[in-house]
Amino acid sequence: ILNVDLEGEEDEKVFRYSFLNSNFQTGLKSPLDEAILKHKEVDVSNYQKIDERLKDEAAMHDSERQYRDLFENIHDFVYTHDLEGRFLTINPAVARILGYPAEQVVGRKVADFMSPFAQKEFWRTYLPHVTGGRTYDGTVTFMTSEGEKRYVEILNSPVFDGQTVRYVRGSGHDVSERKRAEIALQIAKDAAETASQAKSLFLANMSHEIRTPMNAIIAMTDLALGTELNGK
């Protein structure tokens, strides 16, 4: 049994080098290596615990790197805002689509970047809904720095600390192209319906205009056919 206590960062650094690499026969001269090479009694349980802790830390850092990579590179909106509707964090996609630098977005209210109608819905419906502890999904109209409308489908949910809502996390997918196609289709449909109604009205009017004199002509013709012809 190895029996040497860890004393500060130096032993931990030695352990990180020696134990993790399973190579105690190195040229690294340290109190731990000297003890091992001289077959002194060293308690390895502490080092095993450190090994487990270091592996856990490495796994956590790896997970954080993966999350950060996803957060930074995903094309969809990812953001958080406080209970007053101010952006706390945003990913690059939010800044890119809105057309503002990130530092001009974080700290400002989400509604500042919405269309006038969406702003009213934000304060009247959305914010009371999520701050009340409920999930919200729907389509929101954002305005870019150049005044262009961007339609974003959002899914936002509150984050709790016990029973208290601390902040709101959200994600959004830009559906502007699809929304514009739907609007164009609706406009074309409305125009077709208007044209059809105009056609029906025209035919009805024309039928009336033609039918009235035709009735008189048919009546006079029928009267003439039923009357004996004479000199007059």
Image (cartoon, rainbow, N blue to C red):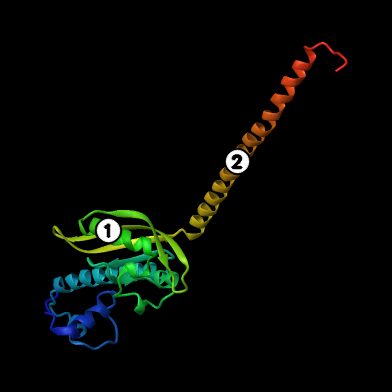
Density class for disc 2 (Cα within 10 Å; few <14, some 14-19, many ≥20) is few
Q: Is residue 5 shown above or below 184?
A: below
Q: Amino acid at mark 2?
A: Ser
Density class for disc 1 (Cα within 10 Å; few <14, some 14-19, many ≥20) is few
Residue 167 point in image, percent of width and height: 23, 65
Disc 1: which residue: 124
Q: Which mark is residue 196?
A: 2
Mark positioned earlier in the residue sequence (1 or 2): 1
Q: Residue at x 23, y 58 (%)?
A: 128
Q: Secondary structure at mark 2?
A: helix
Q: Residue at x 21, y 68 (%)?
A: 52
Q: Toward the viewer: 37 or 202?
A: 202
Q: Which mark is residue 6?
A: none
Residue 138 point in image, percent of width and height: 36, 54
* Camera-nearest label, 1 or 2: 2
Residue 64 point in image, percent of width and height: 31, 70
Q: Amino acid at mark 1?
A: Arg
Q: Is residue 148 left or right of residue 160?
A: right
Question: How much space separates mark 1 and mark 2, taking CA atoms?
Answer: 39 Å
